[in-house]
Amino acid sequence: MVPNGWKYSTTSEVLMKVSNPVDVDASSYYREIGIRSHGKGIFHKKPILGKEIGNKRVFHIEPGCFVVNIVFAWEQAVAKTTDEELGMIASHRFPMFKPKDDRCNIDFILYFFKTKKGKSLLELASPGGAGRNKTLGQSEFAKLSLLLPSIEEQEKIAKILSTWDKAITTSEKLLTNCRQQKKILMQQLLSGKKRLLDKHGGRFSGEWVEVSLNKMAEVIVSPVDKKTEPNETPVELCNYTDVYYNRLITRKINFMKATATKSEVAKYTLQQGDIVITKDSETPGDIAVPALVSEDLKGVVCGYHLAIVRPHTKYIDGAFLNYLFSMQKTRYYFFTLATGATRFGLSVGAINRAHFRIPDVKEQQKIAAVLSSADQEITTLQQKLDALKQEKSALMQQLLTGKRRVTLN
């Protein structure tokens, strides 16, 4: 059902192509644009000499245009040119369009082509196979049928969605800043360069000592696989991806169902304070990724390709040790020790030989608490950002189809 006041128009009826060819000078420098897929906008390439452009057809960028990468249009490689692109150029693969007789708002058009409906239309106009053979046909693009409201309603909708974009951008900047601050804090606190206050208000002053991992923790490599055997005990299995994608191992994770022998259950059940690391991986860079078991998990067993690092609490705090494993230099240490060809792995000996400089347990716990607080702030910001993106996506679906109408002055 067509919403009241909306009507179908082809892209050629509301958009006109902008084409201003560049007379390339071989001795001058030029800067081309590119467009990221999935609606992630324009990026600027490095300046190049005109002689490097050769015979390629290039065109001046005009701000305020809808622009599309015809090679990846089916992946929503669409954007809007701005004043930031003034003086730049684009190849013939990046056709630009501006409104014809003020029949459309470019921001509205861009938002529309970022929706599922818009993506399906771009795919329809991009015949061929996957990848570079799936090119947008400009005649097919011109025939696409768009359901549009009045120009006034288009402008109002675009303005509303722009406000959401600004909120999302602000949240993204806050999250990036918070992550950077935590990174600096980790470097300072886990090296002893910055000391915290103890419970009496004075700074911790005890010496940091270097200790090998085998003296402060037990390394337990799990052989438990994903199979279910009728004569074994039903368990929940903590797998590689549970560790790789989570900072904390908790009951909130949807663990896989499996079985294990009684002896395996006794030995490999996860305990609060354990650090679980990826012992094997397809790439050495994904070796020794840690996750902290932050609560007792009765019935949850550590799976294959993982190792449990179980702290001796007299010497080391589990949360503190987890942060030590997260440090860049620790990750690099294990990266250099990973062996293999198609699959890389760590031996128990290699894990045990790792050395760390540590303070006394009370200072470890204080450091871990500060870093945990920073992690919680990052998690909260990420959740808010995810919620904003979901709400904006739902709002786009309603506004750009006329299911939800805006009030016009």
Image (cartoon, grey):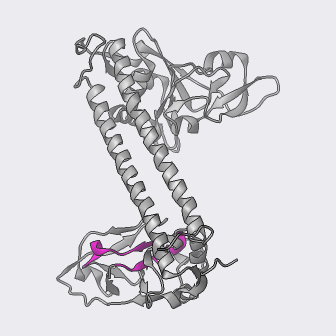
Q: Is residue 71 visible?
A: no
Residue in the image at 57% along x and 39% along y: 241
Count the marks.
0
Residue in the image at 40% along x and 67% along y: 41
Q: Is residue 253 above or below residue 166?
A: above
Residue in the image at 31% along x and 75% along y: 32
Q: Residue furthest front?
A: 409
Q: Is residue 122 above or below residue 220?
A: below
Magenta extent: 64-86
Q: Nearer the viewer, residue 83 or 78?
A: 83
Q: Residue furthest top?
A: 314
Of the 4 image quadrants, the one containing the N terminus is bottom right
Q: Is residue 177 above or below residue 52?
A: above
Q: Residue furthest left?
A: 27
Residue 146: image x %, image y %? 58, 81
Residue 75: image x %, image y %? 52, 69
Residue 225 sits in quarter: top right
Residue 297: image x %, image y %? 62, 22
Q: Is residue 44 above or below residue 388?
A: below
Q: Is residue 233 visible?
A: yes
Does 331 appear in magenta?
no
Residue in the image at 38% along x and 23% along y: 368
